[in-house]
Amino acid sequence: MREDRHVTTVLAVANQKGGVAKTTTVASLGAALVGLGQRVLVVDLDPQGCLTFSLGHNPDRLETSVHDVLVGDAEARDVVVGTEEGVDLLPATIDLAGAEALLLMRPGREFTLARALAPILDDYDTVVLDCPPSLGVLTLNGLTAARSVLVPLQCETLAHRGVGQLLRTVREVQQITNPDLQLLGALPTLYDARTTHSRDVLADISDRYGLPVLAPPIPRTVRFAEATASGATVLSGRANKGAAAYRDLADNLVKHWAGSELVTLG
Ligand code: ADP
Ligand code: MG
């Protein structure tokens, strides 16, 4: 029997709203996938460099970053750094804020990241992209390089305004730059199961946008803030419900990519 060719899954985590746990999801899911034995690369596409910082690297002290890769001054494999969590990181620095303007002037600008990652994709089982809080050219690069997109949503009133705009952007990317892009669904974050309010918001999202809601919801816990400050994810250190939720999510996604149905909240 012929052995299946190795296929790398590229997952974009996107929402133009800030503070919905995109970066937390990329770091924690990345660490959870490593825990399942995967080789994982995470890519920081936010000039703020929060993912880079939360994985123990100080953006101000890095010589090169994803910016150099996007503008063609460096190869991705030369810029990737290791982390204590076991994920590889393509880091960001504030330089990336200037990449947006440089990229805008180039033909095929949405494909820049996809092309830059192509030579190292085979080194990984999963690549997770942390998109910035905008629908600008960096997010378009993320969506164009990805096979799937996951949308973290905070379960609070009005927190999901803007979802319609994001879904329109995803559809445009599917029509124009990446016909294979699959919208996985929304991931409820900062979830408080004790309030009916959180549950109502979730039901409303799946009704209104026809968007699958991924299981499990990620509970609100103070452990995330503690972890970020220490340059590690919630998966290292003491057991907690946040880490358990991201492990279950990783398990759900890996099984889905192997052919099972996604576990959703209906
Ligand atoms: P984004 O990347 O979408 O802007 P972040 O991942 O940076 O969002 O998260 C925003 C803030 O919320 C951070 O301070 C983070 O520590 C906190 N946070 C994320 N997830 C949780 C959670 N499940 N419980 C409590 N705080 C969280
Ligand atoms: Mg972020």
Image (cartoon, rainbow, N blue to C red):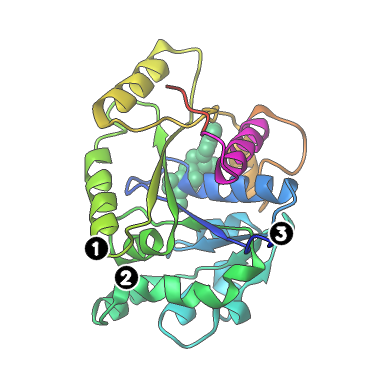
Q: Is mark 3 within 8 Å of ligand 1?
A: no
**Residue 249 belongs to the span the image colors magenta:** yes
**Above or below: residue 121 compared with residue 152:** below
Examine the rendering and report whether any part of residue 195 can be seen: yes
Q: Which of the two discs, 3 and 2, labels the residue nearer the N terminus?
A: 3
Q: Nearer the viewer, residue 35 or 262?
A: 262
Q: Which of the two discs, 2 and 1, labels the residue nearer the N terminus?
A: 2
Estimate the x, y position of residue 15 in percent, counting from the top left: 36, 47
Q: Is mark 1 within 8 Å of ligand 1?
A: no
Q: Quadrant of the C terminus?
A: top left
**24 sits to left or right of 248:** left
Q: Tell me where the magenta segment starts and ends, as one range.
A: 242-261
Residue picked out by circle 2 = 110
- Hey, what amino acid is under mark 1? Ile
Check contact, mark 3 vs mark 1: CB within 8 A: no
- Hey, what amino acid is under mark 2? Glu
Q: List the single residue furthest toward the bottom.
A: 73
The secondary structure that most of the magenta stretch takes on is helix
> Which numbered tag is attached to residue 1?
3
Examine the rendering and report whether any part of residue 57 can be seen: no
Check contact, mark 2 vs mark 1: CB within 8 A: yes
**56 sits to left or right of 201:** right
- Hey, what amino acid is under mark 3? Met
